[in-house]
Amino acid sequence: MATTESSVIFDSAIKVDWTRDVFDRLIVAQAMADKAELITKDGNILKHYNKAVW
């Protein structure tokens, strides 16, 4: 379960500028805030988020 405050996630999501997809921004921002790996098959996320795996 995520424990990071939503304001931190939103601030981080605004800085994700390699996608216009709001949900991708929020998903990646959450993973970044938690310093977590992100399991995805989304090629754009895999290309830009170094902790993304498939």
Image: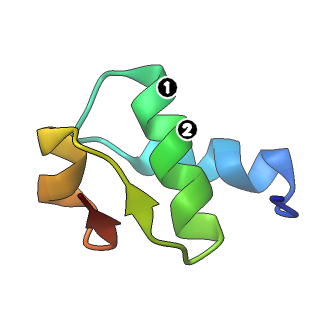
Q: Is residue 33 left or right of residue 29?
A: right
Q: Is residue 50 left or right of residue 9?
A: left
Number of marks in the image? Answer: 2
- Taking 45 as reference, is 34 above or below it? below
Judging from the image, what secondary structure is the residue with disc 1 in? helix
30 or 13, which lies in front?
30
User: Alpha-carbon neighbours of circle 2 within 10 Å: few (<14), some, or many (≥20)?
Assistant: some
Residue for point 83% across, 59% down: 1
Q: Where is residue 37 drawn, in percent x and y? A: 45, 71
Residue for point 52% across, 66% down: 32
Residue for point 49% across, 26% down: 23
Judging from the image, what secondary structure is the residue with disc 2 in? helix
Label 1, on which residue?
Answer: 23
* Three-letter amino acid code at the position of disc 2: Leu
Q: Where is residue 20 drawn, in percent x and y? A: 30, 23
Task: Find residue 43 and report its image quarter.
Answer: top left
- In which quadrant will I find the C terminus? bottom left
- Taking 26 as reference, is 15 above or below it? below
31 or 7, which lies in front?
31
Q: Tags 2 and 1 in contact by the CB under 8 Å rule?
A: yes
Task: Find residue 39 and report its image quarter.
Answer: bottom left
Q: Where is residue 50 drawn, in percent x and y? A: 25, 72
Label 2, on which residue?
Answer: 26
Task: Find residue 21 and report its image quarter.
Answer: top left
